[in-house]
C-alpha cells in the first residue's frame, strides 16, 4: 500500500462487521450455526457461478473452518485466562511440516492445529502459540521478545480513528487549519516503523503514526485534501493519543478529486455487450480446496497475512503427476517513499507483515471483478476479539481465453494449425487503505505459471503550498503532491521441480569478445553458473544479459540427457532507490537483492521476518542467509523480489488505471517437447 491508510479502515472493518451481523441473523433465522449457513449456501447455485466452497475431502492444508477458529480461541481463553482486554491478531492454520505431508494419503487421518498471535494489552506483551485442535490443548504460548509487535489489526484502524477524533490536541491542530467538522476527517493509522530516531518515551509502545485527510462532505474523496503536517502518535494498546506532532500549517488543496459514479458528469457511450459464456460449464473440477484443470492440480490456501496461497502445484505428464511448486505466495511487500521531510521519511508500509493483506481481501463481484464461469472461495479469519470473520468470495477461480497458444501454416502442403491459449486464473484483491492490490496466479496449458500483481486505487498524497513545485513527487492537482515511491513485493516459492531436491543456476547471455573464436562478431551464447551456496545466490536482475534463473532437478534427466528444470523469468523490476544504508533497510533488507535462495526451513517464511512491525533490528532474508548453507541438490526455496517504480502521473489521479508487474515460471527441458501439442483442434466457428 501505500498506505496503511485504510481507505476507510473504519468502513472496511464496519462493513465486515455488518456482514457478520447479517450472517448471524440469517443463521439465527434458519436455526443454524454460522458455518452451517455456509454449507447451506454451498448447496445453492448463485446466478452465473458455481456454488462456493463445496464440502470436499478434508486435507491437512485446508484453511481453518469457522468452528476451528472458535475452538482455538476457546482453548486459548480457557488455558491462559485470556479476557476481553486482549486482542487476537491472527488465528490461522498451523501448516503441517513437509515430512507429515509426504505420508498423507487422501482420506487419511489429519492433524489440525491453529497458529495464534495475541496481545495482552494491559501488559503490552504479545504472544504466539499453537493450539492442537484434535487434542483440544494449547501446545505452546510463548511471549514475543521485547519490542516485537504483531501486525496492526482492522479493529485498531477503526478505534484509532475514533481516539484521534476525540483528542483535544488533534482538534486544535484541525482548527488551526480551518477545518471545523471533525466528522469529515479520515484517519489512516500508518505503521510507526523504527528509524533510530524514536523518542525514549515511546520505547516498548505499540504505536501508529496516524495521518489524516479532510472530506468536504460525507462521500468526498478525502485523499484530495491531506491534512499535511499533522501526525498523531497513538498508543494502540491503551488506544490513546500520545502526542500530536505539528510540522506547520499548509493550506488545504482547493480541488475535489472524486471518482465515484455519482460525481461523474457524463459517461462515454458504453461498448456493446461482450459475453463470456461457457454453456457446458468450466473445465476445472474442485474437490474441497483442490482444483484440477487441464493436467494441472493444486490446492488453494488463504492466510490473513499473505492472502492467497497455492499449495502442491503439479502437472500430469504422460499419466505421471509431476510436482513443480510445494508452496507459493507473495510473502512480503514494502512501499518506500522518497520524501526526506521530517513528517514524511517514515512512510514505508509493509502491507503484508505490518497489516496482513489477507485481512483486507475484497468480496469479489461477478461481472465486475470476474467474468465467465466462476468458482469463488470464501476466506475465514478472525477479528481482534477472536470472533470469526468470513469474507465471501475472496478468491476467484476461472478460465480465460488469452489468444493464440501456437500456430503454423505450411504454405507448400497447406497444412495449417492454430491452438488458442486458455489459462486458469486464481486471484484475490485487497484494499489496503487508499490502494488496491490484485494478486493473480495464472496456469497455462504449455506448463507456464505466471504471477501478476495489479496496482490500482488511490495514490498516497501530501499537500504543498500554492505555487510550490514538489521536489520529491509530482503534482496531480493544484497543491496536491503524489510522492515518488516504489511498491516492492517478495514472492516465496518453495520449489519442487520433479521432486524436492533441486539446484539453482543463473543464465546470462553474453557476446564473445572479438578474436579467432568470434571472427565475424556475431557470436553470443547463454552461459549458466551454479549458485552453490546462499552467499552466491543473492542476485539482481540484469536486462543487459537477459538474465534468468533455472531451478534444476539434477536427479531427473530429459530425453536429451539434461536435467529437467523450470526457468524463473523476471518481468518489470526496479532496484530499491532508497540507499542501502537507509534506516528503513534494517527492516526492508530483503529488497537489496531480487533473487535470494535458501534451503527449506519451515521457520523461514517471511522475507522481512515474522514481526517487521516496529522490529528494532530487522529480520528475515539477510539473517536467514548468514549460515551460508548449501543449495546444491537440496530442498530449495526461491525468494523473488520485484518492484514497481511509481513516478506519479496526472493520469493516475483521482484513481489509478491498473499497473501490472510480476514474473513467470516456464518449463525448460521439463517436458520432452511442446506439452500443448496434444491440444485438440478447435471447431471452426
Ligand atoms: Co503507487
Image (cartoon, rainbow, N blue to C red):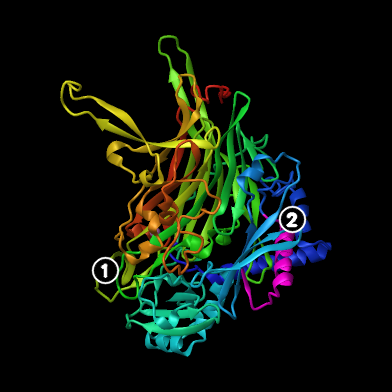
x, y (%) of residue 183? Answer: 51, 81
Q: What is the x, y in percent for residue 517? A: 20, 21
Disc 2 from disc 1: Cα separation: 51 Å
> Can I make out residue 430 in this image?
yes
Mark 2 surroundings: few (<14), some (14-19) or many (≥20) residues within 10 A = many
In the image, residue 408 above or below residue 360: above
Quadrant (top left, top right, bottom left, bottom right) of the C terminus? top right
393 or 606, nearer to the observer? 606
Crowd tier of the residue under label 1, counting other residues whose Cα lies within 10 Å: few below 14, some 14–19, many 20 or above: some
Whether label 1 lies within 8 Å of ligand 1 gets the answer no
Quarter residue 412 falls in: top left
The chief SS type of the magenta part is helix
Q: Position of residue 188 (x, y in %)?
A: 47, 72
Q: Which residue is mark 2?
A: 38
**Residue matched to label 1:** 470
Where ligand 1 lies, by image quadrant?
bottom left
Q: Locate residue 295 relative to residue 190 in the image: left or right.
A: right
Look at the image and tell me in which quarter the N terminus lies.
Answer: bottom left
- 26 vs 313: above or below: below
In the image, the segment drawn in magenta is 64-88
Name, please, the residue furthest toward the top.
Answer: 413
Please name the residue shown 31% across and 42% down the image. 542
Amino acid at each position: 500500500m501505500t498506505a496503511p491508510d485504510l481507505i476507510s479502515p473504519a468502513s472496511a472493518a464496519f462493513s465486515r462487521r455488518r456482514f457478520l451481523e447479517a450472517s448471524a441473523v440469517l443463521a439465527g433465522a434458519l436455526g443454524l450455526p454460522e458455518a452451517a449457513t455456509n454449507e447451506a449456501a454451498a448447496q445453492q447455485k448463485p446466478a452465473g457461478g458455481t456454488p462456493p466452497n463445496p464440502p470436499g475431502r478434508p486435507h491437512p492444508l485446508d484453511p481453518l473452518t469457522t468452528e476451528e477458529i472458535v475452538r482455538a480461541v476457546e482453548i486459548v481463553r480457557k488455558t491462559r485466562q485470556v479476557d476481553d482486554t486482549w486482542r487476537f491478531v491472527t488465528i490461522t492454520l498451523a501448516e503441517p511440516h513437509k515430512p507429515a505431508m509426504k505420508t498423507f494419503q487422501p482420506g487419511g487421518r489429519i492433524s489440525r492445529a491453529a497458529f495464534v498471535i495475541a496481545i495482552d494489552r494491559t501488559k503490552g506483551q504479545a504472544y504466539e502459540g499453537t493450539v492442537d485442535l484434535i487434542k483440544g490443548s494449547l501446545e505452546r504460548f510463548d511471549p514475543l521478545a521485547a519490542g516485537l509487535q504483531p501486525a496492526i489489526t482492522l479493529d485498531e484502524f477503526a478505534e484509532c480513528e475514533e481516539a484521534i477524533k476525540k483528542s483535544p490536541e488533534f482538534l486544535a491542530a484541525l482548527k488551526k487549519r480551518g477545518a471545523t467538522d471533525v466528522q469529515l476527517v479520515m484517519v489512516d493509522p500508518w505503521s510507526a516503523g523504527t528509524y533510530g530516531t524514536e523518542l525514549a518515551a515511546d520505547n516498548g509502545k505499540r504505536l501508529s503514526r496516524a495521518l489524516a485527510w479532510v472530506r468536504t462532505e460525507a462521500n468526498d474523496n478525502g485523499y484530495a485534501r491531506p491534512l499535511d503536517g499533522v501526525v498523531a502518535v497513538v498508543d494502540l494498546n491503551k488506544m490513546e493519543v500520545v502526542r500530536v506532532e505539528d510540522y506547520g500549517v499548509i493550506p488545504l488543496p482547493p480541488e475535489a478529486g472524486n471518482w465515484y459514479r455519482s460525481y461523474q458528469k457524463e459517461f462515454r457511450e458504453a461498448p456493446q455487450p461482450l459475453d463470456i459464456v461457457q454453456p457446458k460449464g468450466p473445465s476445472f473440477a474442485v474437490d474441497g480446496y483442490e482444483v484440477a484443470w487441464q493436467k494441472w492440480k493444486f490446492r488453494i490456501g488463504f492466510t490473513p497475512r499473505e492472502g492467497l496461497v497455492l499449495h502442491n502445484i503439479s502437472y500430469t505428464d504422460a499419466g505421471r503427476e509431476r510436482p513443480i511448486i510445494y508452496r507459493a505466495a507473495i510473502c512480503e511487500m514494502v512501499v518506500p517513499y522518497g520524501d526526506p521531510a521530517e513528517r514524511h521519511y517514515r512512510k514505508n508500509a509493509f502491507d503484508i507483515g505490518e497489516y496482513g493483506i489477507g485481512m483486507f481481501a475484497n468480496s469479489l463481484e461477478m461481472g465486475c471483478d470476474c467474468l465467465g464461469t466462476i468458482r469463488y472461495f470464501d476466506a475465514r479469519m478472525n477479528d481482534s476479539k477472536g470472533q470469526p470473520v468470513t469474507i465471501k468470495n475472496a478468491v476467484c477461480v476461472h478460465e480465460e481465453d488469452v489468444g493464440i497458444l501456437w500456430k503454423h501454416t505450411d504454405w507448400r502442403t497447406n497444412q495449417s494449425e492454430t491452438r488458442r491459449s486458455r489459462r486458469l486464473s486464481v486471484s484475490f484483491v485487497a484494499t489496503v487503505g487508499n490502494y488496491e492490490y490484485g494478486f493473480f496466479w495464472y496456469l497455462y496449458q504449455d506448463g507456464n505459471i505466471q504471477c501478476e500483481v495489479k496496482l490500482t486505487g488511490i495514490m498516497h498524497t501530501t499537500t504543498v503550498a500554492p505555487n510550490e513545485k514538489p521536489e520529491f513527487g509530482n503534482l496531480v492537482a493544484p497543491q496536491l503532491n503524489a510522492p515518488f515511491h516504489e511498491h516492492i513485493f517478495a514472492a516465496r516459492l518453495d520449489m519442487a521441480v520433479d521432486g524436492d531436491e533441486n539446484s539453482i543456476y543463473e543464465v546470462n547471455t553474453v557476446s564473445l569478445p572479438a578474436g579467432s573464436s568470434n571472427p565475424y562478431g556475431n557470436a553470443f551464447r547463454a552461459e549458466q553458473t551454479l549458485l552453490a551456496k546462499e552467499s552466491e545466490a543473492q542476485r539482481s536482475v540484469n536486462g543487459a544479459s537477459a538474465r534468468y534463473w533455472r531451478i534444476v532437478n539434477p536427479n531427473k534427466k530429459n530425453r536429451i540427457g539434461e536435467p529437467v528444470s523450470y526457468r524463473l523469468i523476471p518481468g518489470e523490476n526496479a532496484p530499491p532507490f532508497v540507499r542501502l544504508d537507509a534506516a528503513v533497510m534494517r527492516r526492508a533488507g530483503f529488497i537489496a537483492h531480487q533473487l535470494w535462495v535458501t534451503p527449506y526451513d519451515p521457520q523461514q517464511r517471511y522475507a522481512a521476518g515474522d514481526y517487521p512491525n516496529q522490529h528494532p533490528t530487522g529480520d528475515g532474508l539477510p539473517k536467514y542467509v548468514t549460515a551460508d548453507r548449501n543449495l546444491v541438490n537440496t530442498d530449495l526455496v526461491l525468494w523473488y523480489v520485484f518492484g514497481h517504480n511509481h513516478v506519479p502521473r496526472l493520469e493516475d489521479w483521482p484513481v489509478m488505471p491498473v499497473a501490472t508487474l510480476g514474473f513467470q515460471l516456464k518449463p525448460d527441458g521439463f517436458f520432452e517437447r511442446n506439452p500443448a501439442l496434444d491440444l485438440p483442434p478447435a471447431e471452426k466457428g
